[in-house]
Image (spheres, coloured by chain):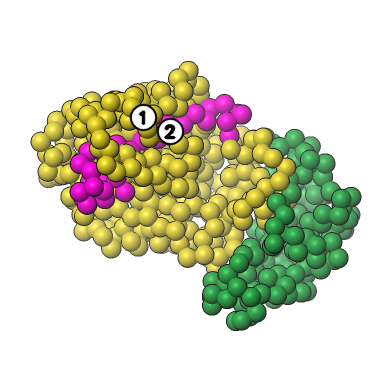
Chain colours: A yellow, B green
Amino acid sequence: MKDQTAVAGIGSTDFAKSLEPSERDLALEAISAAVDDAGLHPSEVDGMACYSMEATEEVDIARNMGFGDVTWFSKVPYGGGAGCGVVGQAAMAVAAGQCSVAVAWRSRKRGARSSRPWAGVSDRVSGDQQMWTRPYGLLRPVDEIAMLTRRYMHSYGATRDHLANVALAARRHANNNPAAVMADRTMTREDYMDSRMISEPLCLFDNCLETDGACAVVITSADRARTLRNPTVLIHAWAQSLPSQHQTMTNFFCEDPLRGPAWSCAKKLWSLSDAGPADVDVAQLYDAFSPLVLLSLEGYGFCERGDAGEFTDDGGIEVGGRLPVNTSGGGMSEAYLHGFNLITEAVKQVRGESTNQVEDVEFSLCTSGEGVPTGAILFRGER
Amino acid sequence: MIEGQLLPELNEFTEPFHEFASRGELRIQKCESCGVLRMPPRPMCPACGSTSFVWQLMSGRGRVWSYVVAHPPLLPAYAELAPYVVAIVELEEDPLIRLCGNLVFDSTGPINEVQASDVTIAQEVTAVFPPADDGFVLPAWQITGATQPT
């Protein structure tokens, strides 16, 4: 299905610590904006894809939006790992002829403390992801990723300065993006180093934001997209991966826990693509936690294993650097919508509409959650 | 035992594991057909597909694979004890069998008695079995020896 489908429209709500509308209403706003941006009418939409975690119900969306007869709908699991799979599967449905115009969206309200998934859990935990770790006080996603991070730092000599590079790049990009929650909040390396520890070795600024908001994209055939109003953003290649013996988040039990889903996803992605890592002009790498960016840089082949820390030195992942990463500010400084704002930013980079625009973008990579079953999309601009 | 501690749902795998722990035994699921150990325990052996298994007694010796130091915000029961160390330990019998647990200096110690400065990766530890009021025993790891190079 290489280059057979395209993102024809994108839409977003405002991003904020707290927004008044419900998740459903935010979804409607973002989807309306995306369909509008594509220059299509909602009645033309016949495909729907979303995340399975905390879903906004398809029938509610379709009835409110005034969609026509929907002939394909699907959900992708694993939270932040879902995003690129949601869009990729919608593209696959379009390419297979199951629908002609699909919308994919993410709406989420996480700004309030009470809404966080680890808050207020019952005193009995279930599932292998939790039963063998949570009783001992490894309670939160940040603890689970901190465990991998400590081992990574030990194995490869990465330092807190490298993690700071990730947080600072995101913040600098956000400071030039008026839509970012952290648009007006600057951060220095000292701010980072002085911030409180959450799960050592990770501090406050190694964590993504918790925000409210929604984003949506419209996917159609490349041929149809070429007749619409926006520059054509081809879905050049995409992949998902649930690696052998992987356990979501508490991935401590497989042979090599530091070789996460990014590696197997990248292998599939590059096998389906005309391009390789060296051809990528800009990347949005899933950043619920700063170390995931380091692991993804290695997994997707932008540097050798263990070298990601160094790769981020000297502005390496900022605009103008070796590989501009998370140019909207990403989950750490724009908004955390389970990675869906990374997808809209990757599309903006191809369209030339980012507030931190990289020059002459042909290949724009977006990845979903590392540390969980994941996905990735390589977008391509038409020359 | 921590007041308000999270406990695993009891099922055909967690119940025997913790029952053995209450007798002072660390036992890991072993495929009866091909002999491969697996953790977390589950119905089918990924190596050979067999659903027959036994609970193999382990020496209890292992090494710290990694660790974190948890700080608030945490669930109230845990926040009271923070900061505390949580480790992943690899077992001597098979370093690919790893368990999560707290580090202690002796089996009755609280989960926050070991400080971050007391821990290094590859440190030798031994499974101990803290007494629990309600009989539900979670293994902990006693710091026993020197750090071996990884």
**Amino acid type, callout 1:** Ile
Q: Which mark is residue A61?
A: 1
Which chain letter matches label 2?
A
Q: Residues within 10 Å of mark 2 (few under 14, many from 20)?
A: many
The secondary element bearing badge 2 is classed as loop
The outermost residue toward the bottom is B34
Residue A79 relative to residue A326: left or right: right
Q: Residue at x 50, y 52 (%)?
A: A371
Q: In this rendering, does residue B146 appear at all?
A: no
The secondary element bearing badge 1 is classed as helix
Which chain letter matches label 1?
A
Q: Residue at x 15, y 39 (%)?
A: A225
Q: Residue at x 81, y 68 (%)?
A: B25
Q: Which mark is residue A56?
A: 2
Q: Residue B118: horizontal and vertical position, in percent?
A: 77, 55
A370 part of magenta stretch: no
Report the Cα–Cα distance between label 2 and label 1: 7 Å
Q: Residue A346: horizontal and vertical position, in percent?
A: 30, 40
Which portion, as a residue range, is magenta?
A: A89-116
